[in-house]
Structure formats: C-alpha cells, structure tokens
Image: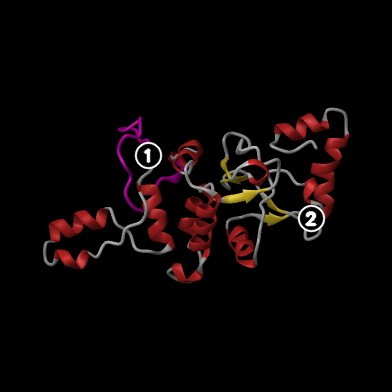
Amino acid sequence: AGVAVVDVRVLGDDNAASSTVQAFTHPPTTRGVLAAIFSLTPTRTATNPEGHELQLGLPVEVDDITTDELVQRFKSVDAEGREALRAFLRDPVNLDTGRIPAELIPHLQALPIYPVYGNGDGSGGSGGNGGNSGSGGDSVSYHTLREQHWLPPESYDTALLDESFVRVTNGRDVQLLEALGVTRMQPATLYLEHVLPRLTVGGAAGAGGRGGSSS
C-alpha cells in the first residue's frame, strides 16, 4: 500500500487515540522499519496456532515466522525495492548507535533481500529460501540468510559460484553481511568444496541439490 507519514502530534492530548496510532506506526529507522515488517507477519503461538493475530513491535519471536511466510510477503517487491530496503537498513544514520544491535540480527537475517549468484531461476534455493526479481536474463535470486551463505573470494570466476554466495556491490554491503555472520570463503575452500565435487561422478547432481549450478 506504500508508505505514509503520520504526525501523531495532531491528536493532541487524546492519549487513547495516540496510543492506538502509535501501535501501528513506527519511526523511520532500521528498528522502526523492521518493527513495521514483522508487525504485519502472522506469528503462530500455542494459543494462536494458525497465526491469525498480528504480532506488534519488537522483539518478535522471529524463529516462529517461517521463511515461506516472509518470502510470500516480499513476493511483489521487485529488485529495486529490495535493494533500496537493504541500503536503508544498513545505513548507520538509521541505526540508534550507528551499529546493528545484536537483537536485530535475526530479523535482518530473515529478510529475503540478499542477492545471490547462481542460475537466477527464481527457485529461491533450498527450502524456498528466497525469491526472484527481474525478468529473462536479468532475473536475480534473493535469499534470506537463515541458511549458511558466504562472500566469494577476492578473485574468482563467477561461473564457479552457486546460490550459497551473496553478491556484493559496495563496502557497506560487505560490512552488513559480516555483521550478520556471512564470512568470506578462501579460494582453496571454494575449489575443494564447490568446484571439485562437480567434476566427480554425480558431483553435478549433488551440487544442484544444494542449490548450485552444474553448468
């Protein structure tokens, strides 16, 4: 539905109305945007097994929200929107202390806003880990970081990289990913664990089962 700016000061001294509005509005910060995203995501609890009620604010039991639910919420968000959201969330200006608080890391890891290498077929990787945006040859897969991902080695052939490697375009992306637990793979590990298995009998099929490309 887009983004609206609400000025709660117009409510004056009506504390009841102000509290109601503030329950559904959030400040334009990393924490506020995450609260807005997760407040609209149904959370299953023992008394609410179908997740019909909405969980408001942070902290949210983020582990109770499935990846499929988050991917579905982002289904209509194109690549430009995901890139803009990631840029906003990582900007130190939008963080209370200029750094990502530990309690927000699981929420950031759960968002399908991280572009990955691979065939870009939109499958989103194993278990519906993400989604795709774009069309034709421009299609890019986006993953959550709930499963293990890596930064590629400094010097590499992109044809060797599968969907477990995150694409980066600038230093701030690297800083964000490292803060979220994504480490840079060494060249030797890349060849031993991702390249050589494809050269063995059945290796290509095994790599494909992990979300890799056998081409």
| Residue annotated with mark 2 | 186
Q: Residue at x 79, y 42 (%)?
A: 194
Q: Residue at x 56, y 46 (%)?
A: 144
Magenta-highlighted residues: 42-63
Specify the principal SS of the magenta part: loop
Name the spot of residue 56 as percent of width and height, x first. Answer: 31, 49
Q: Secondary structure at mark 2?
A: loop
Name the spot of residue 189 as percent of width and height, x first. Answer: 81, 49
Q: Residue at x 58, y 48 (%)?
A: 145
Q: Is residue 1 left or right of residue 166?
A: left
Instruction: Categorize mark 2 by other alpha carbons within 10 Å: few (<14), some (14-19), many (20+).
Output: some
Distance from disc 1 to disc 2, alpha carbons, whole Å, reads 39 Å
Q: Residue at x 13, y 56 (%)?
A: 16
Q: Secondary structure at mark 1?
A: loop
Instruction: Categorize mark 1 by other alpha carbons within 10 Å: few (<14), some (14-19), many (20+).
Output: many
Q: Please state which of residues 85 and 188 is positioned toward the viewer in this rendering.
A: 85
Closer to the chain start, of discs 1 and 2, is 1
Hey, which quadrant is residue 196 in on the image? top right
| Residue annotated with mark 1 | 43
Name the spot of residue 62 as percent of width and height, x first. Answer: 44, 45
Q: Is residue 112 left or right of residue 15?
A: right
Instruction: Give the quarter of the figure containing the C terminus.
Output: top right
Name the spot of residue 84 as percent of width and height, x first. Answer: 51, 59
Residue 207 located within the stretch drawn in magenta: no
Camera sees residue 96: yes
Relative vertical location of residue 131 with respect to residue 16 in this rendering, above or below: above
**Colour logic:** secondary structure
